[in-house]
């Protein structure tokens, strides 16, 4: 495994009990609200009125989602391979992933979601925040304190489920240049990191949900598929 000479440390500004929207700028929240998107990158689900969708935002999102592998694709259930080569190709891939993530109105995207078996994901929390590329991550520590919140996933669009996760994590990883980084995260940042790291291990949010939540989500997916079939047949 290649490793650079420089080490960076990132500390989240999250606080225990902080609302998950606090890491997202007001402009981003307004954009997502207009497009009917929640903060995990999925359309609003339960108990929400039909959203107004801005045509330009919706078109960009659909174009980006066309590259994202969906539930049922074998790559989403496989453990990704370690990254051992840090070159221009990897850096370009990280930048491309970031662009697709932003266009899809998500806050995180893992390489397996694009059909790439590499232990890398990107995330960005807020319009003005820098894009973070996380390579070969390992959770060194997670808090005993947990929190249950709704999550969505670009690979399972249209569905949100309640997922219980540690509120604080410490992750050792590398960036796209191979430099070591230590990430100490809380709140939404910790949740996004854990969600994306799950993708690298072939684990989906549905696997973390309760049986009842999983059954409801699968029912919603089947209903949505039937609705699409009726629209295509009309």
Image (cartoon, helix red, strand yellow):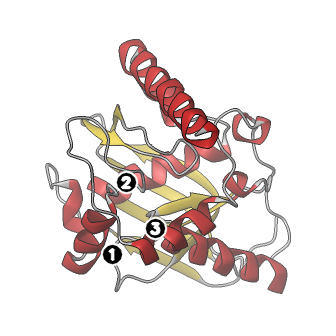
Q: Residue at x 29, y 75 (%)?
A: 28
Which one is in front, 143 or 224? Answer: 224
Drawn side of residue 167 relative to residue 109, left or right: left
Q: Position of residue 95 (x, y in %)?
A: 65, 81
The quadrant in which residue 142 appears is top left
Residue at the farthest front position: 234
Q: How many marks?
A: 3
**Residue at screen point 32% across, 55% down:** 38
Q: Is residue 151 left or right of residue 7?
A: left
Residue 176 as seen in the image, left or right of residue 157: right
Closer to us: 59 or 116: 59
The foreground one among 202 and 206 is 206
| Residue 13 visible (yes or no) | no
The residue indicated by pointer 2 is 190
Report the side of 207 relative to 151 (left or right).
Answer: right
Which of label 3 and label 1 is nearer to you? 3
| Above or below for 132 versus 205 | below
Q: Nearer the viewer, residue 170 or 214?
A: 214
Which residue occupies 16% across, 54% down?
A: 19
Quadrant holding the C terminus: top right
Earlier residue among tags 2 and 1 = 1
- Ranked by sequence position, the earlier of labels 3 and 2 is 3
Q: Is residue 36 visible?
A: yes
Cα distance, mark 3 to mark 2? 28 Å
Camera-nearest label, 3 or 2: 3
Q: Is residue 12 above or below residue 46?
A: below
For mark 3, what is the residue? Answer: 58
Quadrant position of residue 180: bottom right
Q: Which residue is mark 1?
A: 126
């Amino acid at each position: 495994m290649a490793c650079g000479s420089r080490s960076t440390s990132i500390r989240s500004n999250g606080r225990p009990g902080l609302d998950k929207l606090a890491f997202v700028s007001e402009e981003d929240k307004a954009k997502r609200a207009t497009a009917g998107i929640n903060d995990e990158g999925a359309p609003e689900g339960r108990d929400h009125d039909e959203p107004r969708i801005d045509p330009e935002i919706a078109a960009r999102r659909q174009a980006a989602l066309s590259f994202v592998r969906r539930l049922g694709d074998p790559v989403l259930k496989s453990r990704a391979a370690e990254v051992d080569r840090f070159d221009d190709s990897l850096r370009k891939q990280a930048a491309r992933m970031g662009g697709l993530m932003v266009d899809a109105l998500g806050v995180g995207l893992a390489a397996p979601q694009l059909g790439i078996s590499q232990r890398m994901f990107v995330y960005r929390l807020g319009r003005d925040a820098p894009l973070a590329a996380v390579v070969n991550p390992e959770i060194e520590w997670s808090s005993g304190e947990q929190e249950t919140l709704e999550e969505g996933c670009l690979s399972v669009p249209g569905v949100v489920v309640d997922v219980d996760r540690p509120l604080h994590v410490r992750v050792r990883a590398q960036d796209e240049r191979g430099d070591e980084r230590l990430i100490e995260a809380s709140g939404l940042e910790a949740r996004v990191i854990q969600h994306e790291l799950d993708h690298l291990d072939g684990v989906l949010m549905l696997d973390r949900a309760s049986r009842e939540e999983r059954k409801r989500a699968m029912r919603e997916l089947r209903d949505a598929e039937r609705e699409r079939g009726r629209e295509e047949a009309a």
